[in-house]
Image (tube, rainbow, N blue to C red):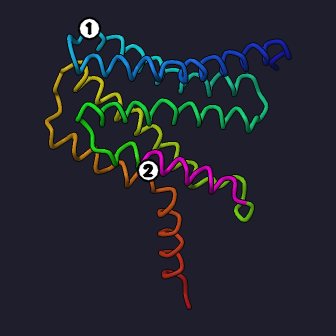
């Protein structure tokens, strides 16, 4: 059993990791921008900032679970930190000409739809199926930014341009999947049931 003071410590650590992700977003954006407009010395700072952001997204949830309790505001803080890091990160790759505009726009649209859907009075507060899809979409967003950091900012270039465009094409599909996939599942289930 976890003691009250331990729960507080775990909760503070979780919130600190989440806040760190928010604070690193402008550092990451500035370093990526600088690395693509001059000597690539800032590329490594961008890579470290991304590694911390991705790791903090994993660890803040673990720490929050150790703290116990179910705090809706903490989940919203975590989701906001994710979107506050991912959209500017993808946006800077758009600004330097490496990603199309609709990549960060798709992620922002999906997050906005998530907020509207979760705040709607006519829908249940917790819809597990879209939440799991959204979770994996968030993981895919971090993977995409990681690929861009390694491939483009660190200039490893292990993926050809066509492969990057294939990844970009997947973003609107997985970003909007929580909106259309449950509908598709219900439609298929209704077609399979006897009339």
**Circle 2 residues within 10 Å: few <14, some 14–19, many ≥20:** many
Per the image, the residue denoted by label 2 is: 175
Q: Is residue 116 magenta?
A: yes
Q: Is mark 2 on a helix, strand or loop?
A: helix
Q: Nearer the viewer, mark 2 or mark 1?
A: 1
Q: What element carries label 1?
A: loop
Residue occupying the point 52% across, 42% down: 135
Residue occupying the point 70% across, 32% down: 74
Per the image, the residue denoted by label 1 is: 41
Residue occupying the point 16% across, 28% down: 158
Task: Name the dominant secondary structure of the magenta segment.
Answer: helix
Could you say where residue 168 lies in the image, as x and y percent from the top left?
28, 45
Please name whichever residue, 157 or 120, is drawn nearer the observer in this view of the structure: 120
Q: Indicate the quadrant containing the N terminus: top left, top right, bottom left or bottom right.
A: top right
- Real-space Cα distance between discs 2 and 1? 33 Å
- Residue 15 in which image quadrant: top right
Could you say where residue 87 lies in the image, as x and y percent from the top left?
44, 36
Could you say where residue 123 lies in the image, as x and y percent from the top left?
70, 62
Q: Does the magenta stretch include residue 113?
A: yes
- Left or right for 161, reference 93: left
Question: Contact (CB < 8 A) between labels 2 and 1?
Answer: no
In primary-sequence order, the first of circles 2 and 1 is: 1
Residue occupying the point 46% across, 24% down: 54
- Left or right for 138, reference 75: left
The stretch in magenta equals 106-120
- Residue 65 in which image quadrant: top right
Please name whichever residue, 96 or 146, is drawn nearer the observer in this view of the structure: 96
Would you place residue 174 above or below residue 39 in this image? below
């Amino acid at each position: 059993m976890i003691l009250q003071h331990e729960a507080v410590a775990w909760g503070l650590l979780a919130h600190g990791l989440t806040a760190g992700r928010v604070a690193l977003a402008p550092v990451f954006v500035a370093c990526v921008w600088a690395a693509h407009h001059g000597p690539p010395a800032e590329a490594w700072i961008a890579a470290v900032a991304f590694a911390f952001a991705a790791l903090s997204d994993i660890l803040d949830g673990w720490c929050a679970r150790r703290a116990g309790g179910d705090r809706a505001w903490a989940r919203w803080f975590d989701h906001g930190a994710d979107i506050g890091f991912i959209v500017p990160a993808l946006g800077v790759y758009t600004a330097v000409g490496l990603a199309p505009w609709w990549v960060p726009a798709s992620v922002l649209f999906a997050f906005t739809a998530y907020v509207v859907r979760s705040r709607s009075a006519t829908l249940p507060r917790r819809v597990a199926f879209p939440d799991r899809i959204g979770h994996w979409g968030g993981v895919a967003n971090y993977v995409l930014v990681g690929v861009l950091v390694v491939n483009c900012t660190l200039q490893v270039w292990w993926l050809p341009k066509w492969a990057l465009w294939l990844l970009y094409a997947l973003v609107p599909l997985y970003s909007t999947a929580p909106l259309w996939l449950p509908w598709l599942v219900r439609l298929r289930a209704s077609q399979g049931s006897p009339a």
